[in-house]
């Protein structure tokens, strides 16, 4: 299905997927060339027990991207087999995140759509002598399972008759037994080297209401069983997943092969007709790839939830979080995320990508797509003393230095302006190229000013600078080309709009926060400087914008109007990323 790229994305930033070469795409090409498949069908199957994070972005881009590239389609399927931990709020969040990344799905499905088919399939396995009801407790199951070096032992209930197993499983379905008292297990091989094949559980008793099916089911299928047969039911050709599922592939294939849905329409035909499923079950192929691991980040749903629940962040969409909704609120772009996924590539080699690579992709996209504005975040007043009281004029600035298509804007100028406090030094350090007593600097778009007087308060703090403007240095005049060492930005004090600006940075201050070899908890590595709030001034054209409008604040970084709290009369901006990688300098210090 074609991707509708958001208008704000840079077409130049994200190279077309058609040019990508990796082992997954080669498998797809070979399958098409051999005639094995006439159409490519994939799926993205998240569990709705939390919000998606940056790690999910790789799976989204691969699942949906390959389907688009080869003219096929991709389903969004919610793996809702674990009631009690899943929430409709997360379902809506997942849908919103997938669309924000620039993708749409062929069909929206739930594993619960197939509960009846899965139940019938389990009955078939029992009837074929390939599944049995077990009464072992959870602790006993672990003991009987064996270890990596020792084979497991057969359950004492393994040789129940087909009739007995059918009766017990149907009574499980009727809700006769307590939670955890019985499980349905596949009968495979308790001595298998792959522990996933040691009679894995297919169903467990869980008397918990389900968000879609209510109290209709007191038993629920296990992930491996439901996932494999859901893929088959939807006619998925290539089931793409991360490397931790590589050891599960033999079980995936066992479930698909032994149920054999294509050969048994009595299991599924009436159910799929009721659900409106338009595909014929097929045999999918599972292919594993390495997950996306970033330095200075965590992607554990449990730990992300802990950050939220303990109030260490301001919610799932906190811009310090690597959830997709957090990254969105911080101003990261879909095109920048897709560019990261493209550059990381697809392989079976696990590795950790430096977070600076991610930030670099975002900068690259924003450099091309973000209009420029002026803002002052640590204001110091500068008075242009040789302009008259009440002076006011309008200057015209380009919105983008590299793209005339962005147009121009009007920027007001008055006698008093705000400049960044760090752009003045009474005692300048070596190499300082900005404003000093008696020195000159160019005010961006205005002309060259000379610092004539420094005004201080009773404590000796600098509160204002009195400067003179060289009138011949104004734009279009003979002195406009006169060279000075520095150029600084400004905001008119009369016209500037007060704004709250949140300076966000990486949530963790070490590259591997999960590594506790130093004896510290991962929570001790939270960066205390990951969020700072300042109050500054914006030029009017930066304030009167819609939420999620992105800009480069000149000389300061890339910023976005907060999607939740920003208003034109009370602007709130979040720093997306600095203009340059400041962490590299820290690491080298």
Image (cartoon, grey):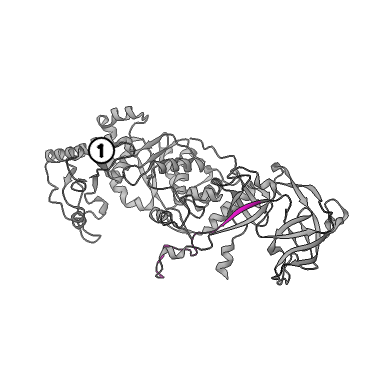
Tell me the element at label 1.
loop
Residue 290 % position (x, y): 42, 53
User: What residue appears at the point 70 percent right and 50 percent down from the top-left corner?
Assistant: 539
Residue 507 on the magenta span: yes
On screen, residue 516 versus residue 170, left or right, reads: right
| Boundaries of the magenta span | 498-518
**How crowded is the residue under tag 1: few (<14 C-alpha within 10 Å), some, or many (20+)?**
some
Residue 571 % position (x, y): 61, 48
Residue 247 % position (x, y): 31, 52
Judging depth in this view, the residue of 150 and 268 nearest the camera is: 268
Judging depth in this view, the residue of 123 and 554 nearest the camera is: 554
Residue 262 on the magenta span: no
Count of numbered marks: 1
Residue 501 vertical position relative to residue 129 in the rendered view, above or below = below
Judging depth in this view, the residue of 220 and 103 nearest the camera is: 220
Residue 80 vertical position relative to residue 557 in the rendered view, above or below = above
User: What residue appears at the point 50 percent right and 50 percent down from the top-left corner?
Assistant: 326
Instruction: Name the residue tied to disc 1.
Output: 217
On screen, residue 311 versus residue 280, left or right, reads: right
Residue 357 % position (x, y): 54, 57
Q: Quadrant of residue 217?
A: top left
Residue at the outermost front position: 458
User: What residue appears at the point 12 percent right and 46 percent down from the top-left corner?
Assistant: 159
């Amino acid at each position: 299905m074609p991707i509708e790229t958001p208008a704000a994305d840079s077409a130049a930033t994200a190279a077309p997927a058609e040019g990508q070469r990796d082992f997954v795409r080669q498998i797809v090409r070979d399958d098409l060339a051999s005639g094995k498949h006439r159409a490519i069908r994939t799926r993205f199957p998240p569990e709705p027990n939390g919000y998606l994070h940056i790690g999910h972005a790789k799976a989204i881009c691969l699942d949906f991207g390959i389907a688009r590239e080869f003219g096929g389609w991709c389903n969004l399927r919610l793996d809702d087999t674990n009631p009690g931990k899943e929430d409709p709020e997360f379902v809506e969040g997942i849908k919103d995140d997938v669309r924000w990344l620039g993708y749409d799905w062929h069909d929206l499905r739930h594993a619960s759509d197939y509960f009846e088919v899965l139940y019938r399939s389990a009955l078939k396995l029992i009837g074929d002598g390939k599944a049995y009801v077990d009464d072992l407790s959870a602790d006993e199951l672990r003991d009987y399972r064996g270890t990596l070096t020792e084979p497991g032992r057969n359950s004492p209930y393994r040789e129940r008759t087909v009739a007995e197993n059918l009766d017990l499983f149907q009574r499980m379905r009727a809700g006769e037994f307590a939670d955890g008292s019985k499980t349905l297990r596949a009968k495979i091989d308790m001595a298998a080297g792959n522990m996933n094949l040691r009679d894995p559980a297919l169903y467990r008793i869980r008397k918990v209401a389900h968000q879609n099916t209510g109290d209709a089911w007191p038993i629920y299928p296990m992930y491996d069983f439901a996932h494999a047969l859901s893929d088959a039911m939807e006619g998925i050709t290539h089931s793409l997943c991360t490397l931790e599922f590589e050891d599960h592939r033999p079980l995936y294939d066992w479930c698909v092969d032994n149920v054999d849905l294509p050969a048994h329409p009595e299991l599924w035909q009436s159910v799929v007709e009721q659900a409106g499923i338009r595909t014929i079950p097929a045999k999918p192929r599972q292919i594993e790839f390495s997950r996306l691991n970033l330095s200075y980040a965590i992607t554990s749903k449990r730990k992300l939830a802990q950050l939220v629940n303990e109030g260490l962040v301001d919610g799932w969409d906190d811009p310090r979080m690597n959830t997709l909704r957090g990254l969105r609120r911080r101003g990261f772009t879909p095109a920048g995320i897709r560019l990261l996924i493209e550059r990381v590539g697809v392989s079976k080699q696990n590795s950790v990508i430096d977070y600076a690579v991610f930030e670099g992709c975002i900068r690259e996209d924003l450099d091309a797509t973000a209009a420029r504005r002026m803002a002052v975040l640590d204001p110091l007043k500068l008075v242009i003393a040789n302009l008259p009281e009440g002076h006011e004029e309008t200057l015209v600035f380009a919105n983008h230095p590299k793209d005339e298509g962005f147009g121009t804007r009007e920027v007001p100028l008055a006698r008093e302006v705000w400049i960044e406090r760090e752009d003045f030094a009474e005692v300048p350090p070596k190499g300082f190229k900005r404003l000093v007593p008696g020195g000159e600097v160019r005010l961006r778009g205005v002309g060259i000013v000379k610092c004539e007087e420094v005004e201080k308060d009773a404590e000796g703090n600098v509160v204002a600078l009195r400067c003179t403007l060289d009138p011949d240095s104004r734009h279009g005049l003979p002195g406009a080309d006169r060279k000075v060492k520095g150029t600084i930005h400004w905001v008119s004090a009369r016209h500037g709009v007060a704004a709250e600006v949140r300076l966000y940075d990486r949530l963790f201050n070490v590259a591997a926060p999960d590594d506790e070899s130093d004896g510290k908890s991962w929570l001790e590595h939270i960066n205390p400087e990951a969020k700072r709030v300042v109050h500054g001034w914006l030029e009017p054209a930066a304030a009167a914008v819609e939420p999620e409008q992105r800009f480069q604040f000149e000389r300061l970084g890339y910023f976005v109007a907060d999607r939740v709290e920003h208003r034109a009369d009370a602007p709130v901006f979040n720093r997306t990323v600095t203009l340059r990688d400041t962490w590299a300098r820290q690491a080298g210090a």
